[in-house]
Image (tube, rainbow, N blue to C red):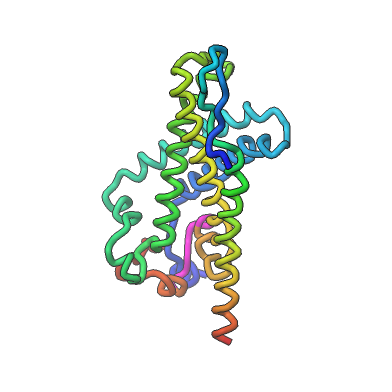
């Protein structure tokens, strides 16, 4: 997986374009992981209290 | 009725609530216009993106100016007792951490987004893509992208926690401004933050 996007200019030199958009699903998955993890933790805690 | 009102503690002044919701709408608009085209949803996003960016910048400036008081800075500062699990003052440790992380992400997007305005034509200025060297633009774009993705992750978590039943009082406080005296001791120490009465 690439972390940055790199292109070449008219003189053949490498130019940094920005972050790789492969990181977008990763950021989304990280958020989803925290949410799902906390929801499971909450569910287990709730059933323990009953 | 007056007993109900006396039971309420003001948590957020109207101006702070307006700031929060303006920031929320502009951040969501910026994330949608910045990231949806990446996943293939093509639409004319640039206009909404830069206008939302300026709205967010102005909102953050007003918030920064309003926050420049010792009491307000202390209320959001992470203290040793927060880390030891003591009951919170006005803000819980989780709220402070979320505030600081989102502040960092939003400030970086603003600091890198403002120079990017030079690269687009608007009714107020003409584009100047040569303001910086190509390598500098690269760094600006990398930082803008990283901060945007951090904002996406944090916004998802922030919205999730705000919708939990046990945290609903904070969402109501951000909408109506108040929490009740009965809700306070669950997570807050009334001695650390009694709050002004309404």
Residue at the farthest bottom position: A50
Please say if B77 is above or below B150: below
Q: Position of residue B129 (x, y in %)?
A: 52, 16
Q: Hey, which quadrant is residue B171 in on the image?
A: bottom right
User: Which residue is at a point 35% across and 45% down the rendered structure image?
Assistant: B67
Question: Which residue is found at the position 39% from the left and 62% from the top?
Answer: B93
Q: Quadrant of the C terminus of chain A?
A: bottom right
Residue A47 higher or lower than B73, as above or below:
below
Q: Locate the N terminus of chain A and report the quarter of the image it occupies.
A: top right
Q: Horizontal and vertical percent for residue B103?
A: 43, 45
Left or right: B31 in relation to B17: right
Where residue A4 appears, x then y in whole percent?
53, 35
Q: Nearer the viewer, residue B33 or B176?
A: B33
Q: Quadrant of residue B172?
A: bottom right
Looking at the image, residue A33 lies above or below residue A15:
below
Image label count: 0
* Place of residue A17 in the rendered image (x, y in percent of width and height, measured from the top left): 54, 27
In the image, B143 versus B54, the foreground residue is: B143
Query: Which is more toward the observer, B61 or B77?
Result: B77
Q: Is residue B198 visible?
A: no
Would residue A20 be visible to someone looking at this image? yes
Q: Is residue A26 magenta?
A: no
Q: In percent of the image, x 54 and y 70: which residue is there? A: B166
Q: Which residues are magenta?
A: B174-181
Q: Residue at x 57, y 55 (%)?
A: A31
Is residue B178 shown in magenta? Answer: yes
B55 sits left or right of B76 in the view:
right
């Amino acid at each position: 997986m690439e972390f940055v996007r790199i292109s070449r200019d008219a003189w053949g030199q490498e130019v940094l374009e920005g972050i790789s958009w492969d990181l977008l699903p990763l950021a989304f998955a990280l958020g989803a992981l925290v949410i799902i993890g906390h929801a499971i933790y909450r569910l287990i805690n709730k059933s323990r209290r009953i | 009725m007056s007993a109900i009102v006396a039971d309420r503690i003001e948590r957020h002044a109207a101006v702070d609530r307006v700031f929060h919701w303006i920031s929320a709408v502009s951040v969501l608009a910026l994330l949608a216009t910045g990231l949806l085209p990446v996943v293939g949803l093509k639409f004319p996003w640039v206009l909404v993106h830069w206008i939302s960016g300026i709205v967010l910048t102005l909102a953050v400036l007003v918030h920064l100016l309003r926050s420049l008081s010792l009491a307000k800075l202390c209320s959001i500062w992470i203290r040793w007792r927060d880390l030891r699990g003591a009951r919170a003052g006005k803000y819980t440790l989780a709220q402070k951490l979320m505030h600081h992380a989102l502040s960092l992400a939003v400030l970086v997007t603003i600091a890198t987004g403002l120079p990017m305005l030079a690269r687009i034509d608007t009714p107020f200025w003409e584009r100047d893509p040569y303001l910086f060297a190509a390598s500098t633009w690269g760094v600006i774009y990398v930082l803008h992208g990283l901060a945007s993705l951090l904002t996406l992750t944090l916004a998802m978590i922030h919205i999730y926690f705000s919708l939990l039943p046990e945290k609903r009082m904070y969402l109501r406080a951000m909408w109506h401004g108040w929490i009740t005296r009965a809700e306070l001791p669950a997570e807050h120490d009334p001695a650390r933050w009694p709050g002004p009465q309404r």
